[in-house]
Amino acid sequence: MSRIIILGNAGGGKSTLARKIARSRGLPHFEIDKLLWLEGWIPAPLDTYARKHEEVISGQAWVIDGVGHWNSIPARVDRATEIILIDMPLWMHFWLAAERQISWASADLAHPPGGLLAMPPTRDLFRTIWEIDEEWMPGIRALCTDAERDGKTLHCIRGVDALEAFSNDLDKPKC
C-alpha cells in the first residue's frame, strides 16, 4: 500500500500535487491544514490535532500534504512509503504565496488551504514562511535524508519547473 507524504514550505504546491497524486493512484488525500486550522485561521486544539493526525496516519493507504505541528512530522515520515520534499528557495515560496493571496482576494482560488473561507493575514503567512525556512526546513531535510537512507523513496523538488515536470509525469502511462 502506498503512503505518500508531501512536505515543504507554504505556497509550494503541496496540496495541488497531492490532489493529482491521489487521483492518479486512487488514494485518499488528507490535507494537514484541515487538521491544523479552524475557520478564521484559529489553531485547532493540540489534542484534537494529535488525535485526528494519528487516525489519518494509521490508515493503510493515503497521500498527506502539509507540515502541521513539528512533533507530528516524524510519525508521518515513519509511516510513509514515499516522501516528496518540495524544497524551493525562500523567494519562490514568497512569490507563490503572494500569487495565491491575490487569487484568493480575487475570489479566483479553486482550492483554499484547509478548505478555509477566510484568507490568512498576509503578514502572518509570510512570517510563517520565513520561520519554516529558517527553523524547520533543516530538520525536515534531515528527517527525509534519514528516511531515504533507511530505504524509503525520496523525491526532492527544488523549483517550479521540477514540480511541473514531476506532476506531468503522473499523467504518463506506466508501462
Image (cartoon, helix red, strand yellow):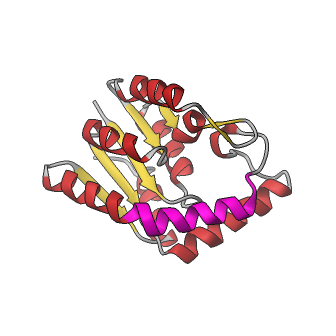
Q: Residue at x 48, y 25 (%)?
A: 52
- Please provide the residue range marked out in magenta: 120-137
Instruction: Indicate whether 76 appears above or below 1.
Output: below
Q: Residue furthest right?
A: 106
Describe residue 82's horizontal placement relative to residue 132 as left or right: left
Q: Quadrant of residue 59?
A: top left
Instruction: Indicate whether 9 appears above or below 107.
Output: below
Q: Residue at x 51, y 69 (%)?
A: 160
Q: Position of residue 66 (x, y in %)?
A: 49, 47
Q: Position of residue 67 (x, y in %)?
A: 47, 48
Q: Residue at x 74, y 62 (%)?
A: 122
- Of residues 96 and 132, the one nearer the viewer is 132
Q: Inspect the magenta stretch and tell me whether residue 73 lies in it.
A: no
Instruction: Indicate whether 140 appears above or below 42.
Output: below
Q: Inspect the magenta stretch and tell me whether residue 124 lies in it.
A: yes
Describe residue 52's horizontal placement relative to residue 118 as left or right: left
Describe residue 122's horizontal placement relative to residue 8 as left or right: right
Secondary structure mostly seen in magenta is: helix
User: Dividing the image into 4 quarters, which one contains the N terminus?
Assistant: top left
